[in-house]
């Protein structure tokens, strides 16, 4: 039986990008991955992230915003930072872990009409989904 990879997506607020990445990998990776997300300063899951993910048939409404410290003792295989701040603030893990960095713009930083904000989340969803698909292909998944 193939090893299940434990993957943690890390962002600052753990409200949008890392939550979306967690949901996408969970949906695409199936039982080959155990997927988590966390933040260096968690803020709760953004309702627009939940809405955009639902548009793609992925329910993240039950996901929780968690602090990175909750995962320091977990036997993680891969930690993927999805924002520059989180990469810079990422702690040293006590066990060996593969670290990747996929910088994506923060859709929660977009202000204006709801349509503009939703489009920002849709754009970031597309970028993250594409990057995860490429990574899965690189990993032979």
Image (cartoon, rainbow, N blue to C red):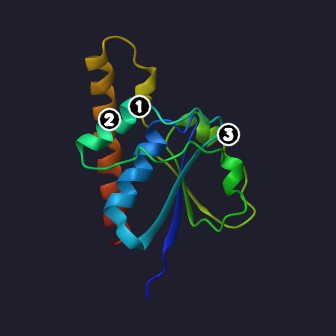
Q: Which residue is mark 2?
A: 51
Circle 1 SS class: helix
Res. 103 visible in picture = no
Tell me: 61 left or right of 87: left
Residue 93, compared with residue 128, is above or below; it is: below
Circle 3 SS class: helix
| Numbered disc total | 3
Q: Which residue is mark 1?
A: 47
The residue at the far top in this view is 112
Relative image position of residue 116 (x, y in whole percent): 28, 18
Decide: marks 2, 3 in contact (CB < 8 A)?
Answer: no
Q: Nearest the camera: 10 or 56?
A: 56
Decide: marks 2, 1 in contact (CB < 8 A)?
Answer: yes
Q: Which residue is mark 3?
A: 89
Decide: marks 1, 3 in contact (CB < 8 A)?
Answer: no
Relative image position of residue 112 (x, y in whole percent): 35, 11
């Amino acid at each position: 039986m193939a090893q299940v990879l434990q993957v943690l997506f890390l962002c600052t607020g753990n409200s949008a990008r890392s939550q979306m990445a967690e949901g996408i990998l969970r949906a695409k990776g199936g039982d080959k991955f155990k997927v988590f997300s966390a933040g260096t300063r968690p803020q709760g899951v953004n309702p627009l992230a939940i809405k955009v993910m639902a548009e793609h048939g992925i329910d993240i409404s039950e996901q929780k915003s968690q602090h990175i410290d909750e995962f320091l003792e977990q036997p993680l295989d891969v930690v993927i930072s999805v924002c520059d701040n989180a990469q810079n603030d990422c702690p040293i893990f006590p066990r060996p872990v593969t670290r990747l960095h996929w910088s994506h713009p923060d859709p929660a930083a977009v202000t204006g009409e709801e349509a503009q904000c939703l489009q920002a989340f849709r754009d970031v969803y597309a970028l993250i989904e594409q990057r995860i698909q490429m990574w899965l292909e690189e990993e032979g998944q």
